[in-house]
Amino acid sequence: MISGLKNLGFNVDADWNKQTLFIHGSAGLIPKSQASIDCQASGTTMRFLTALVSLGNGHYVLDGTARMRQRPIGDLLNALRMLGVEAEAGSAGECPPVTIRSTGVTSAEACIQSTTSSQFASGLALVAPCMPEGLSLELTGTLVSTPYLDMTRKIIESFGGKCELRNDRQWHIAPTGYVSKNYEIEPDASAASYFAAAAAITHGTVTLEGLGRNSMQGDIEFCSALEQMGCTVTWSSNSSSCPSITIQGNDLKGIDIDMNAISDTVMTLAAVALFAEGPTVIRNVAHIRDKETDRISDLTCELQRLGAIVDEQPDGLTIHPAPLRPAKIQTYDDHRMAMSLSLVGLRSKGVCITNPACVRKTFPNYWSALEELVQTSRQ
């Protein structure tokens, strides 16, 4: 994302020691009129920057890895076309590379199919305050990952935007522009799920600091799923200035759960399910087939490699725990596959993760953080 913004001419400085980014805005304008952006394996970068360059006056090409060229983006491109932007995909299936030729947005109304990803709507909504007349956006189809849409609205409003929701599907965003400010980002709830799961799997105790009931991230509800499975989960009070969630592992039982709203944690829950009593049914996550890998089919394959009995469905899977065996886990270059299934090795010997470096996409120091957790538990 940072590299893409720099390619567009934005000034972005990072102080990694202080975990701080300095972004210098350009009042809703794209500094460069031509740019080629390598989004690599980042779907968020592809979708958000495709929406962003619609504000520009020029020619922009966005591409990525071989897998990125298999991930549909046509729903976003169709919405941009409604706004007067010339948007082309590199394949008949409307997948990247994407070419955007824009002289600016000329309409203020669009509808967007939101069955594949919530990020199509989020990308458009985030740039809408900088559109000449704002945006009236209708979301169609079966909505997925809706907590991220709520997060999008809150961020828009945090930077001075006005976003009116007449219902979940009708968004009206005023052309206010944005006001610069200092903004503190919450700890990553999706990343935190691995350590919550570690507590569940090992019957240990983990406290997640900086996250609580008032978090804007939907993935904190992963802790509620663990609670359903038998863990003891303690939430700090809503008024606490230092929120936290403590997870204590206990004997686990299988559950039947709709994970549409927290689909980034499906594979983490699947790892926990291997150690539960009885089957776990995960439903309503058909959209995760279009992630970094097919997170239903390929997850099924790897769980079976570990010895589990797994029934694959079009929109989910059922996991029947069975005696586990050593296995060399294929990650498919998917960071979440690597991190989730590494947790199995906390209780089952002989789990080897291929291509462990793929975690660098979202959690470069995951392995050292996991090792620190293990060493702390032994003290």
Image: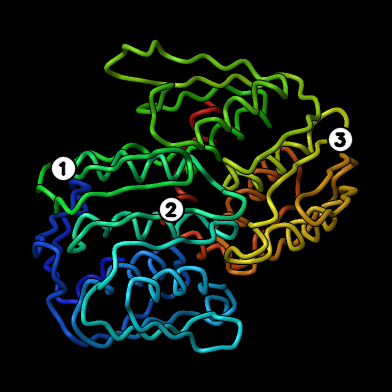
N-terminal label among 1 and 2: 1
Question: Closer to the camera, 377 or 221?
Answer: 221
**Residue at label 3?**
279
Which type of secondary structure does the marked residue at label 2 adopt? loop
- Give the alpha-carbon distance from disc 1 to disc 2, as whole Å: 30 Å
Name the residue located 28 percent from the left edge and 40 percent from the top edge: 185
Image location of residue 100, percent across then percent down: 34, 83
**Residue at label 2?**
363
Which type of secondary structure does the marked residue at label 3 adopt? loop
Question: Closer to the camera, 161 or 287?
Answer: 161
Q: How many marks?
A: 3
Determine which of the numbered discs, if any, sits on residue 293 in the image: none
Tell me: 313 left or right of 47.
right
Image location of residue 147, percent across then percent down: 48, 39
Name the image quarter holding residue 132.
bottom left
Tell me: 328 left or right of 220.
right
* Residue type marked 1: Gly
Determine which of the numbered discs, if any, sits on residue 160 in the image: 1
